[in-house]
């Protein structure tokens, strides 16, 4: 069924052109559905709503067969229609989304992602570039699945700023955390857009001292990590390592550590420190892999075999608690993406409280990405802020491709900023700094443009601006030339432009030489003294205030 759209925003457009206040030009909008009682038409309901004080209807879509009309409004639609005998109900219109199935070739084999309900979690968030996971390991190479998201890091083994992976373990762990999903290649990590901070604390043989690991933890905390993954450990603890894990906790950074692959219940460090989340390896049936360490000191389990990318870019299957830990780190990054205000303690609580039962080998259960993400998801009903940065409001006309910049902000994050004209989207940007452009070809006169910001919860706010657009070239009707004594020539083109001429230029050709004459004020007369009696080609170019030009070629004659 095709529905007709009724546009009833004329009042808004008129107000924009007449110079509305900044507050009125940036109002929160909402979409609601109005159920109609028998005998009431959609048009009547829309008109009643638009007539209500403090409410403006921006557009409407009637669903006649269902006895309803969906409207986008500013103001309180429910309050305005309360008690209206023609209205059966008023409800905020929920948004449904397609069920996300990544198109990565290995996705069908990634039983671990399905087991932890990652696809359902991705319906809420696929991650955020504002979330950083530090991988303390053998280093991380910027392989294809992590392209553009590996930050500068540090190598505490060789004491330099090159944390390249000379083993492969660290790159594999990082790819389990954050391999790009739905990009048509390889496999899907957990947090598709989060960033990786590489911190090399183990050498090419896969070994590292507690002193380097402790320094790596402090470095990660001080360089903006939200989550630290450590797929490393051993049966011995140390004061320096315990202090470093405590340092991370005190600074609001969640530490994820692998429980170890010895198949024993003996505590492994740093996983066994209370501030760390210890991770065991689980099978497709939520049983414990025989090689996974276990016991009450192990907090959660996660799939112990996952697709990964090695240091040379090849795709491998990565097994062990070294693979399970990054799954939990990726889930933690998704949780932080869903609620940037969540503390490390809240992220941990969300992971542990929503874990699915997995058996006595682990304290809580097997991690549930969807449950953890939804446990902290914020019900956001506050619209983002949106404001124009450029072009500034002025009488200067613009032409051709016009670039618009904006500022937008929201506590849960701005998803998109769109540019609209006459209700249609003509430009969009999905990341700050917000810059949009459109081709104004064919447009002339005052054009009302709308910036619309949408946050991650679907709330929107708009801001309008009227811009003067001029894509019409000026005219040159005639070019008159007069000659006074001593070969003094006056060139006087008859020029015109609706928004004003900025400059008239004449180029006189005298053999191999050219003489350029300009005028920037009316009357547009150009004076020149001919070197001798002759006929000279002249090209006159007129430029208007928007930069449009018109050119006409003629000849002037200078007699003896």
Image (cartoon, helix red, strand yellow):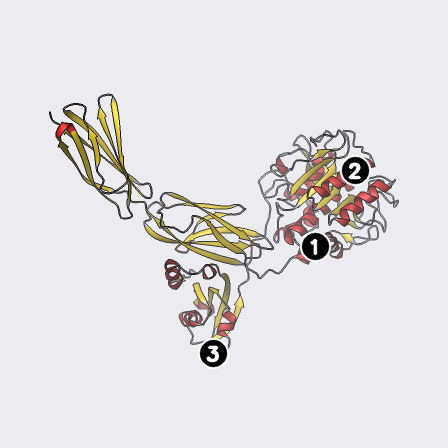
Quadrant the N terminus occupies: bottom left
Q: Is 524 situated left or right of 442 in this image?
A: left
Q: Could you say where residue 346 lies in the image, as x and y percent from the top left?
A: 72, 55
Vertical placement of residue 261 versus 47, above or below: above
Give the numbered dot on residue 85.
3
Q: Is 187 situated left or right of 63 in this image?
A: right
Q: Could you say where residue 69 lies in the image, as x and y percent from the top left?
A: 46, 67
**Residue contact between numbered discs 3 and 1, judged by CB atoms under 8 Å:** no
Can the viewer see residue 60 in this picture? Answer: no
Quote the CA–CA distance across marks 3 and 2.
Answer: 70 Å
Dot 1 falls on a residue whose secondary structure is helix
Quadrant the C terminus occupies: top left
**Considering only order in the chain, which callout, 1 or 3, is on the residue closer to the N terminus?**
3
Residue of label 1: 372
Closer to viewer: mark 3 or mark 2 = 2
**Residue contact between numbered discs 3 and 2, judged by CB atoms under 8 Å:** no
Residue of label 2: 213
User: Which quarter of the figure has residue 307?
Assistant: top right
Closer to viewer: mark 2 or mark 1 = 2
Q: Could you say where residue 328 lies in the image, as x and y percent from the top left?
A: 73, 47
Quote the CA–CA distance across marks 2 and 1.
Answer: 28 Å
Residue name at image x 62 percent, y 61 percent: 379
Quote the CA–CA distance across marks 3 and 1.
Answer: 44 Å
Dot 3 falls on a residue whose secondary structure is loop
């Amino acid at each position: 069924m095709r529905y007709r759209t009724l546009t009833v925003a004329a009042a808004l457009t008129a107000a924009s052109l007449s110079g509305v206040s900044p507050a009125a030009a940036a109002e929160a909008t909402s979409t609601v559905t109005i159920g109609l009682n028998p005998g009431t038409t959609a048009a009547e309901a829309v008109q009643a709503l638009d007539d209500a004080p403090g409410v403006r209807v921006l557009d409407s879509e009637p669903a006649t067969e269902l006895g309803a009309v969906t409207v986008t409004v500013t103001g309180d639609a429910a309050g305005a229609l309360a008690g209206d005998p023609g209205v059966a109900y008023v409800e905020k219109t929920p948004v449904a989304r397609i069920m996300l199935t990544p198109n990565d070739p290995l996705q069908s084999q990634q039983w671990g992602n399905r087991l932890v309900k990652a696809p359902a979690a991705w319906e809420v968030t696929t991650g955020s570039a504002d979330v950083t996971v530090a991988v303390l390991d053998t280093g991380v190479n910027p392989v294809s699945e992590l392209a553009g998201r590996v930050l500068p890091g540090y190598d505490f083994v060789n004491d330099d700023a090159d944390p390249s992976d000379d083993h492969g373990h660290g790159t594999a762990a990082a790819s389990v955390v954050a391999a790009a999903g739905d990009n048509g290649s390889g496999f899907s990590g957990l947090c598709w857009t989060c960033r990786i901070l590489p911190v090399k604390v183990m050498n090419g043989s896969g070994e590292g001292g507690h002193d380097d690991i402790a320094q790596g933890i402090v470095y990660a905390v001080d360089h903006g990590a939200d989550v630290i993954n450590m797929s490393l450990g051993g049966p011995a603890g140390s004061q320096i390592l315990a202090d470093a894990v405590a340092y991370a906790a005190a600074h609001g950074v969640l530490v994820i550590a692998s429980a170890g692959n010895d198949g024993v219940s003996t505590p492994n460090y740093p996983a066994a420190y209370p501030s760390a989340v210890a991770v065991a390896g689980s099978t497709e049936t939520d049983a414990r892999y025989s090689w996974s360490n276990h016991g009450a000191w192990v907090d959660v389990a996660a799939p112990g075999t996952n697709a990964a990318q090695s240091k040379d870019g090849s795709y491998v299957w990565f097994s062990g608690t070294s693979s399970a830990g990054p799954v939990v780190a990726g889930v933690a990054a998704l949780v932080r993406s869903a609620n940037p205000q969540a503390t490390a303690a809240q992220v941990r609580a969300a992971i542990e409280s929503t874990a699915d039962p997995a058996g006595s080998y682990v304290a809580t259960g097997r991690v549930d990405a969807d449950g953890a993400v939804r446990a902290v998801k914020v019900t956001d009903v506050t619209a983002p802020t949106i404001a124009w940065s450029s072009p500034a409001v002025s009488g200067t006309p613009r032409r051709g491709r016009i670039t618009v910049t904006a500022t937008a902000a929201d506590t849960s994050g701005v998803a998109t900023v769109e540019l609209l004209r006459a209700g249609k989207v003509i430009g969009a940007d999905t990341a700050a700094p917000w810059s949009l452009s459109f081709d104004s070809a064919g447009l002339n006169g005052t054009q009302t443009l709308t910036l619309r910001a949408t946050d991650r919860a679907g709330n929107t706010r708009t801001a309008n601006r009227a811009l003067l657009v001029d894509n019409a070239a000026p005219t040159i009707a005639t070019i008159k030339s007069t000659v006074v004594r001593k070969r003094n020539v006056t060139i006087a083109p008859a020029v015109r432009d609706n928004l004003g001429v900025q400059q008239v230029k004449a180029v006189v050709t005298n053999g191999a030489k050219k003489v350029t004459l300009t005028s920037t004020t009316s009357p547009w007369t150009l004076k020149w003294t001919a070197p001798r009696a002759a006929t000279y080609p002249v090209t006159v170019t007129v430029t208007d205030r928007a930069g449009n030009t018109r050119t006409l070629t003629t000849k002037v004659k200078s007699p003896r």
